[in-house]
Amino acid sequence: MINADRLTRLLADLVRHNSINPDLVSGAPGEGAIAAFLYEYCRRAGLEAEISEVAPGRANVIARLRGRGEKPALLFDGHIDTVGVDGMTIDPFDPVIRDGRLYGRGAFDMKGGVAAMVEAAVAAAAQGPPPGDVVLAMVADEEYASLGTQAVVRDVPAGAAIVTEPTALNVCVAHKGFAWITVETAGRAAHGSRYEEGVDAITRMGRVLASLERLEREVYPRHRHPLLGRPSVHASLIAGGQGLSTYPDRCRLQVERRTLPTETPDDIAAEMEALLAGLRHADPSFEASWSLTLFRPGLEVPPEAPVVRAVCRAAAAVLGREPALVGEYPWLDSALLAAAGIPTVIFGPAGAGAHAAVEWVDLASVAATAEVLASVITAWGAER
């Protein structure tokens, strides 16, 4: 059913398109060119397609295989933006095939999954209309603010979704979320010689860092998820001070907190309020504030959900083995789909090098991903 040569050519063409996210690398081209390419490719392959701008110069491609209208739409979601290429040891946009692997920026994260879902829809179309519509959302901006999938959630109704991020042909039913937190401590500016007047905001921030370290060392290990392990926190960026001979009156710390699927913004707020309250109790002169700058929830979908059963059944038939149910540590767009009430699972190819100097995807696993997805399309609804 799957045309492996056609699939490999499509993947290589996707890698040739520089689609670095401009919010990550100033001046990068973004998704415009690759979106135009996918739009034309899908239309030539017999799919309906449209380009939807989600921000100036930033585009989604929404392609559709019309079904018989018997079942709700099945949504495939995959991002077409990539991170930058600094430090890469080969030409990032000249795909190289060696030992069954295709090398290049985005091959693994996640143009392999995007190519697989396009090929799956094209192959399934040759079998006749599926039970319900199949929608391919090839989205912008996953690597920064997920503008693309946020637009999909708003504009594209679906009964279930499969995100084709790489999973090494396992079925991912859970992943972590994250919170970005900013903490500011207040001091008092004074000449470096006037210790009786100055209050050092940077050393005060040291107390915050020590408290975060205690959470990381003593509290988080007691909270574990069977697939995802424990939550975590790390100090990402810190800034403060005006000069070597001046007491700093402000210090700003940016923190990333990786969350389990059950954790909410209210949980993060309670944790931060308790942390700062403890420091104020120990020293009533301690002044600090905090804000939550971004929160993305984790994901957990029940193994008995119809979309999970459908993917597991198709994968077992294609792979000749039952796929493992796994959790993934990174945050994925799947959480936005699930939060909108769309049961969502993640399934995709094998490889390595996401955001790294050497990135590759295993071509046999890309073909297997496409075969599984095509099987899900033709059988969608049997598990409902």
Image (cartoon, grey):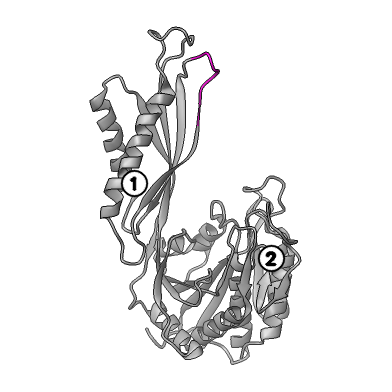
**Quadrant of residue 309 within the rendered picture:** bottom left
Confirm whether the magenta stretch covers residue 242: yes
Q: Is residue 359 visible?
A: yes
Mark 1 and mark 2 lie on one chain; the one further toward the N terminus is: 2
Q: Position of residue 355 (x, y in %)?
A: 59, 57
Residue at 26% of width from left, 31% of height from top? 277
Quadrant of the rendering where the C terminus is positioned: bottom left
Q: Is residue 228 left or right of 95 when viewed as pictured?
A: left
Q: Disc 2 marks which amino acid?
A: Gly
- Residue 228 higher or lower than 302, as above or below: above
Kindly identify which residue carries mark 1: 216
Residue at 33% of width from left, 56% of height from top? 230
- Residue 216 higher or lower than 20, as above or below: above
Q: Dot 1: what SS?
A: helix
Q: Dot 2: what SS?
A: loop
Confirm whether the magenta stretch covers residue 80: no
Mark seen at residue 383: none
Residue at 46% of width from left, 38% of height from top? 254
First to last magenta residue range? 239-246
Using the image as rendered, state which of residue 107 and residue 245 is in the foreground: 245
Q: Disc 1 marks which amino acid?
A: Glu
Q: What's the distance in space between the residues labelled 1 and 2, CA to CA?
A: 36 Å
Mark seen at residue 104: 2
Q: Main secondary structure of the magenta part?
A: loop
Q: Are marks 1 and 2 in contact (CB under 8 Å)?
A: no
Q: Position of residue 377 (x, y in %)?
A: 52, 84
Residue at 57% of width from left, 55% of height from top? 143
Using the image as rendered, state which of residue 123 and residue 323 is in the foreground: 323
Q: Is residue 296 visible?
A: no
